[in-house]
Image (cartoon, rainbow, N blue to C red):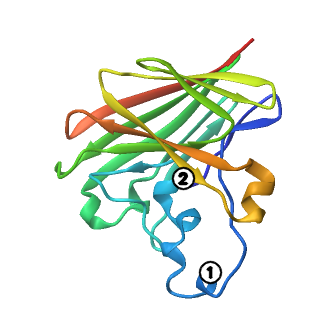
Amino acid sequence: MIHEIYIDHTPVIIDAGVGTYTRQTFSNERYKIWTMQSNYHNLPMINGVPQSTGGQYKSSNVVARKNFFSVDISKAYPENAKVEKWTRSYQMNGKSIRINDAFSLKETAAPNIVNFLTWGDVQKVSDGKISISVNGVKALFTYDAKTFDYKIETIALDDPRLSNVWGKQVYRLSFTAKSMVKKGNYSFAIQKVK
């Protein structure tokens, strides 16, 4: 599952896309390319395990209605993720969108990490608040600082196919759960700022 979030026709939470095609792109080494890895998309690593590849790994229980979308992504992960259910939902409310992950695990093996990819000018405002500015659009990304440790990774773009779209770099926002629990709920929000 890949998602992007736009504000005023500008992508704020992004999918970087595919770089220039090479021999590696069409080989069994394709998943060594970062743009092909699920942990560089807007997805969780459940029990430290990324979403898997192959037709047998797919989402289920899709619900779509006005201003709301949800899907159970648990079956998109391999058995060693030890996940029973992981429902990712998006709720629009005025100028904000809430992203919610409700989950149930068979057991805990490693902290869950929720990743988001973004670009532009990214600054930590305070614990629980990150400012994202892109092409004149300003957004505030909020998360629960009591629940997560936050890290930002800069990914330099040396492939013109990517840098012509996103600039010199993109950023991966990684939120690592401070505690390991079998059942829980993670919540993030993105709001347009004047």
Tell which of 87 and 50 is nearer to you: 50
Whether residue 18 is situated above or below residue 177 in the rendered picture:
below
Q: What amino acid type is highlighted by mark number 1?
A: Thr
The image quadrant of residue 123 is: top right
> Looking at the rendered structure, which numbered label has been put on residue 41?
2
To which residue does mark 1 refer?
A: 25
* Horizontal and vertical percent position of residue 38: 49, 60
Tell which of 88 and 23 is nearer to you: 23
Residue under the image location 48 percent in, 27 percent down: 188
Tell which of 96 and 135 is nearer to you: 135
| Left or right: 94 as drawn, with respect to 70 | right
Residue under the image location 59 percent in, 84 percent down: 24
Q: What amino acid type is highlighted by mark number 2?
A: His
Whether residue 191 is situated above or below residue 55 in the rendered picture:
above
Mark 2: few/some/many CA within 10 Å (<14, 14-19, 20+): many
- Quick check: can you spot residue 126? yes
Tell which of 72 and 181 is nearer to you: 181
Mark 1: few/some/many CA within 10 Å (<14, 14-19, 20+): some
Residue under the image location 69 percent in, 60 percent down: 17
Looking at the rendered image, the disc whose residue lies closer to the viewer, 1 or 2, is: 1
- Cα separation, mark 1 vs mark 2, equals 17 Å
Give the position of the N terminus as an image quadrant.
bottom right
* Horizontal and vertical percent position of residue 140: 60, 20
Q: Earlier in the sequence, mark 1 or mark 2?
A: 1
